[in-house]
Image: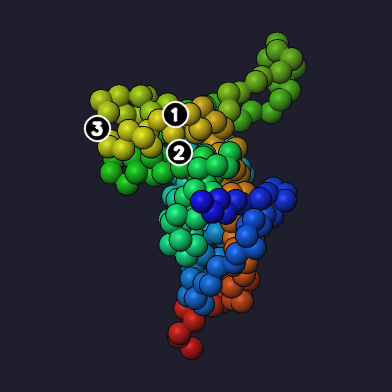
Amino acid sequence: MTPSPELTVDSDWEAHWSDQWNATATPDEVISLGWSRAALIDARHRQLATDDGRLAWTAAVEAAWWAISLDESLSNVIGSKRYREARSRNRFGRVVEGMLWLRNVHAHRLVVTGYGGTKRDFFTPEDKGAMFVISPSNRWLTADEIDPDHKMRREDLRGLYDQHVAGLPLDMSLEIAHKWISQVMFASEIPAPAVLNDPTVLGSSYRA
C-alpha cells in the first residue's frame, strides 16, 4: 500500500509535501484564499491590539470563522483525503479541527465562548498598595460551559475542541491556525494574489 503523503514542516510558516505535490488553484481561488487569509490576519491583529474584552472576543470569533472558511476551501482545492489526513497528523492542524466545532456553535447560537480579564499595566500606581496586577488571559471556554445540554451535534468535533482548543488563550489558538494555513498554502505552492496589496481593487479575475 502506498503511504499517504505527509506535510513536512520546515518552519512555522513553511512546509512541503513529501511527494513534492502542488495544487492547481484557479485565479479566483487564489484571490479568495489570499484575501481570506489577509482577513484572518487583520482580525488577529485587532484581537491583540485592544484592551476591551468584548472587542477582543468578537475579533477572535471573526478570526476563527475565517480560519475555518480557509480550512474548508483548502480541503476543496487540495483534495479532502490528502488535506484531512495531513491535518489530523499535525499538531497545528488538530487545533483547526477543534475550531470547527467552535465555528459551528457560532453559526447556530448566540453564546459567549470566551472568558478572561482586563489588560492592565503590569505595575500599579504606588497609592494602590500593590506591586503588580496579573490579569487572566482571555481563553476559550470548555464545550460543556458553552453547550451544557449537548444540543450541538458532531460529538467527535466536540471532543477535538475540548482536547485541542478549550482553555487556550484566544491569541495562541489563532496564531496556531494561521501557521497551519500558511504551511499548507506554502507547501501547495498557492501564490499570493496579485491584487492583494492594492486596497483600491475589489473584484475577481474575470472582471475588468
Residue 162: give its label: 1
Q: Earlier in the sequence, mark 2 or mark 3?
A: 2
Count residues near mark 3 (Cα–Cα under 10 Å), then give few for <14, some for 14-19, many for 20+: few
The residue pinned by badge 3 equals 151
Q: Is residue 53 above or below residue 31?
A: above
Residue 62 at x, y = what percent?
A: 46, 49
Label 1: which secondary element = helix
- Relative image position of residue 65 (x, y in whole percent): 44, 50
The earlier-in-sequence mark between 1 and 2 is 2
- Please, what is the three-letter code of the amino acid marked with disc 1? Asp
Residue position for label 2 = 98
Name the residue located 50 percent from the left edge and 33 percent from the top edge.
165
Q: Residue 137's x, y, as percent?
A: 58, 28
| Gap in angstroms between the C-alphas marked 2 and 3 | 17 Å
Q: Amino acid at mark 2?
A: Gly
Whether label 2 touches label 3, CB < 8 Å: no
**Whole-percent x and y of residue 95?**
52, 39
